[in-house]
Image: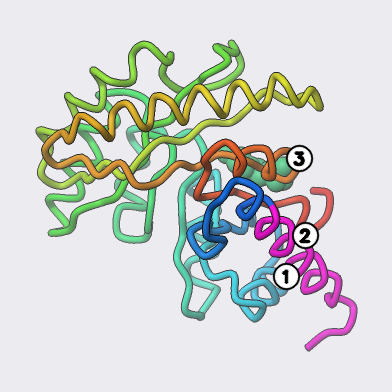
Amino acid sequence: MTEELAYIGANIANIRERVKSAALRSGRDPQDISIVAVTKTVGLEKINRAIDEGLNVLGENRVQEICEKYDNINRECKWDLIGHLQTNKVKYIIDKVNLIHSVDRMELAEEIDKKAHKSGRVVDILVQVNVAMEESKFGLCAHEVKDFVRALSKFNSIRVKGLMTIAPYTQNEDVLRSVFRELNKIFIDIREENIDNIDMELLSMGMSNDFEIAIEEGANIVRIGTAIFGKR
Ligand SMILES: *Cc1c(COP(=O)(O)O)cnc(C)c1O
């Protein structure tokens, strides 16, 4: 192992401690929170180091990058797509992804269902919600989520596993907390409907700057890049 990459191990240990504390503060089992290591722009050697440290779910936001890395990381790991997905690129990743975090429109869901069916698999997805209604971000508006999820229940080759959001880029804790809280409310509300073919289990929210607040507000997947690998 390269000594110069030791900081990755130290960062991961630090993050695990903080995840654990945040989980305990909110009365939850730290084991229930999973960390996606966001590896966009990160090179293979560093990714391998994170896998050595036990982080084997990797998050990428570009299809091309997943495809290139997929062939070059010969380790036991899973790839999550966390970024915007163009409909015409679904075919490239359908056999590679573990979980798509960013389903935000019917046309995309139809294409994922079609290609998954062709591959003989069922693909797990999350519905992306733009809670703060930021122009720059993808995702459904909060009030559209329930009907959208209901509509997805008809697909046989997609399994809805939960919701995802990207909070506004701010240090304002109140703003962050209210965004995460609102998504958690929608999540619980839909879960209580017990819709066929919908398993509301996963709530993907929180990044390097805000993952502790996200966990306190109900996240069970956090997506962390910078705090593991350093500035991109
Ligand atoms: C880049 C990215 C992250 C990780 O962001 P950091 O601030 O580096 O932790 C998480 N989620 C999505 C969707 C991203 O694009």
- Whether ligand 1 has any atom under 8 Å from the Cβ at mark 2 is answered as yes
Residue at x 26%, y 21% (from the top left corner): 148
For the residues carrying marks 1 and 3, which lies nearer the camera in this image? 3
Q: Is residue 8 magenta?
A: yes
Q: Decide: marks 2, 1 in contact (CB < 8 A)?
A: yes
Residue at x 20%, y 32% (from the top left corner): 110
Give the magenta-colored segment's residue range. 1-21
Label 2 and label 1: CA atoms lie apart by 7 Å
On the image, the x and y values in percent for residue 62 come to 53, 45
Going by the numbered disc 1, the residue's amino acid type is Lys
Q: Horizontally, is 70 left or right of 47 in the view?
A: left
On the image, the x and y values in percent for residue 201 come to 34, 47
Secondary-structure class at tag 2: helix
On the image, the x and y values in percent for residue 93 come to 36, 52
Q: Which residue is mark 1?
A: 46
Label at residue 209: 3
Q: Which residue is mark 2?
A: 229
> Which secondary structure type mostly characterizes the magenta part of the structure?
helix
Figure check: 188 above or below 66: above
